[in-house]
Image (cartoon, rainbow, N blue to C red):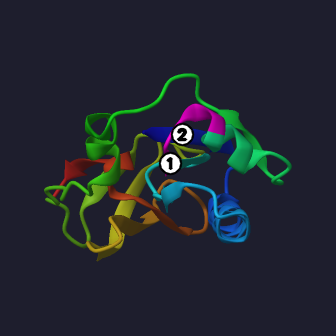
Amino acid sequence: MLFAFRVTAGQENIVADLLNEKTKKTKAPIQGIVVSPYLKGYLIAEAENEVEAKRLITNVPHVKGVLQRPMQIEDLKEMLESKPQEITLEESDLVEITSGPFKGEKAKVVRIFKDKEEVIVELVEVAVPIPVTIKINTVKVLQQ
């Protein structure tokens, strides 16, 4: 059965290491622990039952709790798989930022990192052009 643990965001890898060490020391029946960049603040562990899952996280720092019901592998597939995004941006395109602290600002695309799904843009409606790195899915093309 799969169980999701709520953990402090940004501490997923540290908690996974702690749980792994605890599993080895106590020989707990935990088959695996999953850390995914798509699940901020959560870890997934495969355990025989809920009692073993709760016993594993007892007294482990940064763990906030276990989700109430076990998960199915189908619940996780879309969260764990990276979906290749169709990238239609090109350098020097004029875009509008659709989320984050610069929401609504117009910017010019300076560089595109397809593998990281990130883009560096320069804000155009400011006194000094500021290069900003943001996710590709947070921009909308205004003019190519």
Q: Which residues are magenta?
A: 45-51
Q: Position of residue 7 (x, y in %)?
A: 69, 46
Q: Position of residue 134 (x, y in %)?
A: 46, 60
Is residue 65 within the magenta segment?
Answer: no
First reached walking from the N terminus: tag 2 or tag 1: 2
Q: Residue at x 60, y 68 (%)?
A: 128
Where residue 16 sits, quadrant-wise, is: bottom right
Depth check, front residue: 63 or 124:
63
Q: Residue at x 54, y 39 (%)?
A: 4
Label 1 sits on residue: 44
> In the picture provided, is 136 more to the left or to the right than 68?
left
Where residue 1 sits, quadrant-wise, is: top left
Q: Which mark is residue 139?
A: none
Callout 1: few (<14), some (14-19), or many (20+) C-alpha neighbours within 10 Å?
Answer: many
Q: Position of residue 112 (x, y in %)?
A: 30, 73
Q: Residue at x 21, y 54 (%)?
A: 83
Is mark 2 in CB contact (under 8 Å) with mark 1?
A: yes
State whether residue 83 is above or below residue 69. Answer: below
Amino acid carrying label 2: it is Ala
Q: Residue at x 83, y 54 (%)?
A: 61
User: Farthest residue in the top direction?
Assistant: 68
Quadrant placement of the C terminus: bottom left
User: Can residue 20 be seen in this snapshot?
Assistant: yes
Q: CA distance from mark 2 to mark 1?
A: 5 Å
State whether residue 69 is above or below residue 30. Answer: above
Depth check, front residue: 137 or 42:
42
Label 2 sits on residue: 4
